[in-house]
Amino acid sequence: MTTSTLSPARPAGTTATTVAPAGAATTTTSDVLDRAPLLALLVPLVLFAHGIVDWVDGLDQLGKPGELVELGGLGGIASAREPGALTVAAGILLVASVGGFAWLTAALGRRLEHLPVAVPTALLAAFGAGATAAVWLGHVSGLLGTDLPAALTWGGPALTAAALGVVLVALTVEGRLPAGSLALAALAAGVLLLPWGLVPLGALLLLIALAPLTRTASD
């Protein structure tokens, strides 16, 4: 009597399973849905475009006394009630950039592992973006006057910027963002606050500061 050395037949309806070798790259859902690298590249460029369009739109103010300070400033919302395609385009680009920064804040918050600031910063940034859009639409539709308090006019962008700043600080604390990038982002924020029409410069500084974030989390 002989003993067969053949493997037993595989039951019908079963399929062979393949074990991936250790170290093989796997793609997770979070990697697929991570839009932070693309947003970190595109959103500062949208802000740069806003600065250029708003600067060109303000060239006609050079002949008016006391209006030079408005040239190139963050005037897309404040001047949206005035007619003109460039004025409307500047406002749209500003609203789009604030919304993009809110989206970037939420995307970067998902990268945090230890500091629980993702949810509150995402909510704060979204509220700021919504407030920015609401004020701009109010100017365009004529529901809001032109003489609004500065806190209402710039409150939305300021809230979104604050939320993004908190996330960047948290990323730096967790070692996911170089300290030099955080310092450069703070410098960019300071440049954007200056009343000298330096929005394009501030946007470029912010683009450089966010450059390390243009890589995916798995890189």
Image (cartoon, helix red, strand yellow):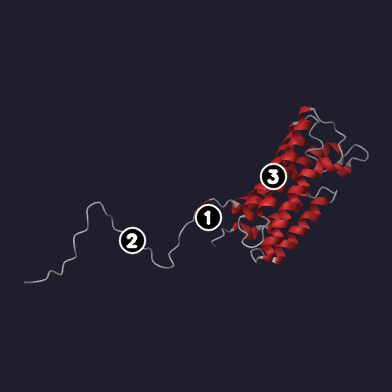
Q: Secondary structure at mark 1?
A: helix
Compared to residue 2, the image places residue 115 above or below, namely above
Compared to residue 3, the image places residue 78 above or below, namely above
Q: Amino acid at mark 2?
A: Thr
Q: Position of residue 14 (x, y in %)?
A: 27, 54
Judge depth for marks 3 and 1 and give the one in front: 3
Q: Secondary structure at mark 3?
A: helix
Measure the C-alpha gap from mark 3 to mark 1. Answer: 22 Å
Considering every residue shown, the one lying at the far left of the view is 1
Q: Position of residue 151 (x, y in %)?
A: 84, 43
Task: Give the residue at x 62% y 52%.
Answer: 107
User: In the rendered image, which residue does mark 3 sit on?
Assistant: 126
Mark 1 residue crowding within 10 angstroms, few (<14) / some (14–19) / many (20+):
few
Measure the C-alpha gap from mark 2 to mark 3. Answer: 44 Å
Q: Is residue 118 visible?
A: yes
Q: Amino acid at mark 3?
A: Ala
Q: Quadrant of the N terminus?
A: bottom left
Left or right of 146 on screen, residue 156: left
User: In the rendered image, which residue does mark 1 sit on?
Assistant: 31
Mark 2 residue crowding within 10 angstroms, few (<14) / some (14–19) / many (20+):
few
Task: Give the residue at x 67% y 49%.
Answer: 122
Compared to residue 134, the image places residue 102 above or below, namely below
User: In the rendered image, which residue does mark 2 sit on?
Assistant: 18
Task: Give the residue at x 36% y 63%.
Answer: 19
Q: Is residue 205 visible?
A: no
Q: Position of residue 38 (x, y in %)?
A: 60, 51
